Image (spheres, rainbow, N blue to C red):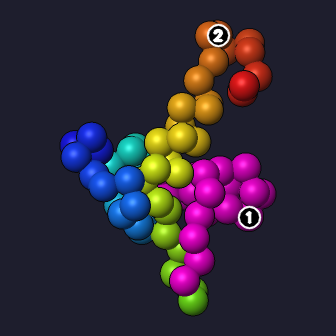
Amino acid sequence: MQEHLNDDRLLSRSEVHTTFGLSQRYLEVAAVKGDGPPMIKIGRSVRYRVADLRQWIDAQRVGSTSQGVA
């Protein structure tokens, strides 16, 4: 399903979970720690741009569980 999303589309945490499989709780904790995908704050709302999510997910790729993130 995610292949058909426009790269500039903004997704809520719920939509990120449905589309990319990242839990809403992970996104909340990562936002506080600053180690999750880039986000956009509009007022009190947090949104994630599809292109940023794809780039962030690609950057998490490793060859084994003993490897750190690239």
Q: Is 48 left, or right, of 35 in this rendering? A: left
At label 1, counting other C-alpha atoms closer than 10 Å, the crowd grade (few under 14, some 14-19, many 20 or more) is few
Residue highlighted by disc 2: 64
Check disc 1 and report its element: helix, strand or loop.
helix
Q: Disc 2 versus disc 1: distance between alpha carbons?
A: 27 Å
Q: Is residue 65 magenta?
A: no
Q: Is residue 28 above or below residue 43?
A: above
From this viewpoint, is residue 52 visible?
yes
Seen from this angle, which residue lies furthest bottom?
43
| Label 1 sits on residue | 32
Image location (x, y in percent) of residue 22: 47, 47
Determine the secondary structure under disc 2. Answer: loop
Residue type beneath disc 2: Ser
Question: Residue 16, percent across and down?
Answer: 41, 55
Q: How crowded is the residue under tag 2: few (<14 C-alpha within 10 Å), some, or many (20+)?
A: few
Quarter of the figure with the N terminus: top left
Q: Left or right? Give the position of 68 relative to 13.
A: right
Three-letter amino acid code of the residue under disc 1: Val
Place of residue 15 in the rendered image (x, y in percent of width and height, measured from the top left): 35, 61
Q: Quadrant of the C terminus?
A: top right
Q: Which residues are magenta?
A: 23-42
